Image (cartoon, helix red, strand yellow):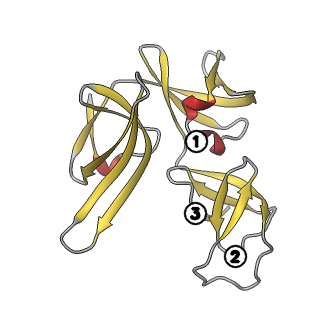
Amino acid sequence: MAKILATEIRAGNLIELDKRIWRVLKSYHVHVGGRGGAYMQIEIKDVESGQKRNERLSTDERVERPFIDRRTMTYSYHDGSNYVFMDNETFEQISLGADFLEGQAEYLLPNMEVEINFHNERPIGIQLPTTVVLEVVETEPGIKNATATTSFKPAKLETGLVVQVPPFVNAGEKIRVSTDDGSYVERA
């Protein structure tokens, strides 16, 4: 098994802690001024039992990555509460429940390639690209020449995800969104 730095942990990664395999749901790099130092705050879920917990890791700490079979698959469609993916090599389809994706479904678009992680021939996690391009379908009208402002407004995207965007973003535009924390990155 390979060890990775705590700062390399991303949402969707699989790690091994306390001899169990955990899926990372959220990952935040926290830097506290003064004496506090920096650390990684992660929310993880046990892939066997479904138990969730939060962990705080120092930035120089290393964690184990379990041996997993990563397969590149294409998201095909949403069928009720299931999401259907097709293996790019064997063309087999697998169906994963909405509870399995845990908030990652809001970043999926048809024909998007993702990595699905398998452990003992069972799907245990999905790895999305670090950013995705989504279209804004609903937001307040933009403000012309508003480029250097710190205010944000909510925008509903084509997948139903709502993110905070700068005031110059209008409906119909495509934006890049981080899949780690759901934040606006830039116009696409």
Task: Classify 168 as above or below 55.
Answer: below
Q: Earlier in the sequence, mark 1 or mark 3?
A: 1
Provide the secondary structure element on which disc 3 rests: strand
Position of the C terminus, as image quadrant, is: bottom right
Gap between marks 3 and 2, in whole Å? 14 Å
Provide the secondary structure element on which disc 2 rests: loop
Position of the N terminus, as image quadrant, is: top left
Gap between marks 1 and 3, in whole Å? 19 Å
Q: Position of residue 165 (x, y in %)?
A: 65, 68
Q: Nearer the viewer, mark 1 or mark 2?
A: 1
Residue drawn at (57%, 34%) of the image: 101
Task: Classify 125 as above or below 42.
Answer: above
Residue 87 in view of the camera? no
The crowd level at tag 3 (other Cα within 10 Å; few <14, some 14-19, many 20+) is some
Q: Earlier in the sequence, mark 1 or mark 2?
A: 1
Residue drawn at (67%, 51%) of the image: 161
Q: Which residue is mark 2?
A: 167
Contact, CB < 8 Å: mark 1 with mark 3?
no
Q: The disc labelled 3 sits on which kind of residue?
A: Val
Q: Earlier in the sequence, mark 3 or mark 2?
A: 2
Task: Classify 92 as above or below 84.
Answer: above
Residue drawn at (80%, 64%) of the image: 171
Task: Classify 188 as above or below 141.
Answer: above
Q: Position of residue 52 (x, y in %)?
A: 40, 36
The label number, if any, that marks residue 185 in the structure image: 3
Q: How many marks?
A: 3
Q: The disc labelled 2 sits on which kind of residue?
A: Pro
The label number, if any, that marks residue 103 in the structure image: 1
Q: The disc labelled 1 sits on which kind of residue?
A: Gly
Q: Position of residue 69 (x, y in %)?
A: 43, 22
